[in-house]
Structures are given as C-alpha cells and as structure tokens.
Image (spheres, coloured by chain):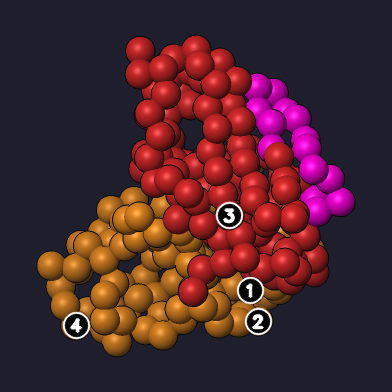
Chain colours: A orange, B red
C-alpha cells in the first residue's frame, strides 16, 4: 500500500544527543514536510522540501536539520541545540506544494520523542 | 501568533447527536480551508475542504460552513458515532502558498 512511514514510533534521548527521525514515502510525491505537535497546540512547520536536493525553513527550524537526497526520503535531525525537543513529530507529503490547495497533505503516523 | 483557532478545546457529545466544531481565523487573505481528524497516536487525516468562493460544502455525514464576513469556519458531524472521537483541526492556506496554518484542535469525546 502507498503511504508515509515514520520511524521510530517512540524514541528516548538523553540531553545533548542528536537524534534522526526517518520519513519515507512511496506516493511519488514531490513535496515533503516536517511538523511538530505539542499538547494543546496546532501543528507547527519545521522544514519543508519542494523537490530533491532543496528544502526551506518553516516557522520553527532552529535546532533542527533536514536533508532531501532522495525523492522518497526526508529525514529530520533533532540536534542538541533544540531547547525543548520533547514532542510528537509528524511527517507529511503532497504531490507538490500546489497540492496543498487540494487538501492532498498526507501524514505519517508520527514519532514521539522524549528527552530524558 | 497563530492565525487559526478553535473556540473550544473540548467537546462532549452524546452518541447519535450532531456535533458542531468551530474555528475562527484572522487572515482575511486565506482562501482555502481544511478540516483534519486526528485519532490518538496517529497522524491527521483529511476530512473535508472548502474554498473561499463557497459558503457550504457537504461530505459523508460532515458539512463545512464558511462565513467570511466574521472569519468563521465550522464542521458539523451528523449522527456522531464513537469512531468520531478524535482531535479535529482546522487549517487555512493562501492560494499558491506552501504552508498550512493549523488551529490548536478540539478534542471530541462521544458518550455512549
């Protein structure tokens, strides 16, 4: 089945460590996104990529890094510079950034990161 | 700050009743609106959308109403079922912009 796969589903990290969250899609979508979700808040955009080898910062990019070496993959690294990394992280994709105007934003199941 | 918000963070509904979830937005330039449903521990799923040139759109058991005058959006769920228990988000977008702005969400709990 086509879809978006995020891994791991749960991750624990010690302070000062970097951690990378995986996001893979087999929908042949051009655009991919990373959102952060905190309790009682809406989704906030961290980074997005419209095409391979290109990505842009979202609203809360500080302390995060991404890469887009392949169309199918958009990993997110939460670095030690992120002051409050404990959150639920959601990856999404769309056929293109124009696809966002047709509601075609498909989400993965999320990765819950807890910093100990 | 956020440009999209929901009036109530929680809503408790009796099974079989209709649910109404409200959302206010502040960006008058927004021209596309979406409702998502997020079940516990899962990613959001698309429910229904509406463009600013419409004021009502119906889907299966759901209706979205848009009032541009007061910048208000609502989602109505008919004959609410236990499977409707979830967090509901509204989101807005400006045409040709890459970014969706999400509200904080309303948690709907269906009572048996």
B110 in magenta: no
B60 in magenta: yes
Residue labelled with disc 1: A49
What's the distance in space between the residues labelled 3 and 2, CA to CA?
Answer: 34 Å
Q: On the picture, is B69 further left or further right than B38? A: right
Residue labelled with disc 3: B24
Q: Is residue B57 above or below residue B96?
A: above
Looking at the image, how many numbered discs can be counted on the residues? 4
Query: Closer to the observer: label 4 or label 3?
Result: 3
Query: What SS does tag 3 mark?
Result: strand
Query: What segment is highlighted magenta in the picture?
Result: B51-64
Residue labelled with disc 4: A16
| One can see residue A79 in this view | yes
Residue labelled with disc 2: A54
What's the distance in space between the residues labelled 4 and 2, CA to CA?
Answer: 28 Å
What's the distance in space between the residues labelled 2 and 1, CA to CA?
Answer: 6 Å
Front-most of A47 and B63?
B63
Query: Closer to the observer: label 3 or label 2?
Result: 3
Kindly indicate whether the residue at mark 1 contacts the one at mark 2 (C-beta within 8 angstroms): yes
N-terminal label among 2 and 1? 1
Instruction: Tell if the residue under mark 4 belongs to the same chain as the one under mark 2.
Output: yes
The residue depicted at 69 percent of the width and 23 percent of the height is B60
């Amino acid at each position: 089945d086509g879809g978006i796969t995020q891994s791991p589903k749960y991750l624990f990290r010690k302070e000062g460590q970097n951690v990378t969250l995986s996001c893979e899609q087999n929908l042949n979508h051009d655009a991919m996104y990373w959102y952060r979700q905190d309790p009682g808040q809406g989704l906030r955009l961290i980074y997005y990529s419209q095409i391979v080898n290109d990505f842009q910062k979202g609203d809360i990019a500080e302390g995060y890094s991404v890469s887009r070496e392949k169309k199918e993959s958009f990993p997110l690294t939460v670095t030690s510079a992120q002051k409050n990394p404990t959150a639920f992280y959601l990856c999404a994709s769309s056929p293109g950034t124009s696809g966002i105007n047709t509601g075609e934003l498909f989400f993965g199941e999320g990765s819950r990161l807890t910093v100990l | 700050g956020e440009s999209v918000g929901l009036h109530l963070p929680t809503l408790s509904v009796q099974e079989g009743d209709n649910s109404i979830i409200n959302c206010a937005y502040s960006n008058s330039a927004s021209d596309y609106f979406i409702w998502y449903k997020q079940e516990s521990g899962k990613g959001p799923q698309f429910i229904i959308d509406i463009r600013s040139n419409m004021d009502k759109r119906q889907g299966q058991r759901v209706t979205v109403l848009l009032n541009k005058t007061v910048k208000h959006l609502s989602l109505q769920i008919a004959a609410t079922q236990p499977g409707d228990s979830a967090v509901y988000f509204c989101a807005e977008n400006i045409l040709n912009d890459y970014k969706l702005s999400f509200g904080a969400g309303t948690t709907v709990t269906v009572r048996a």
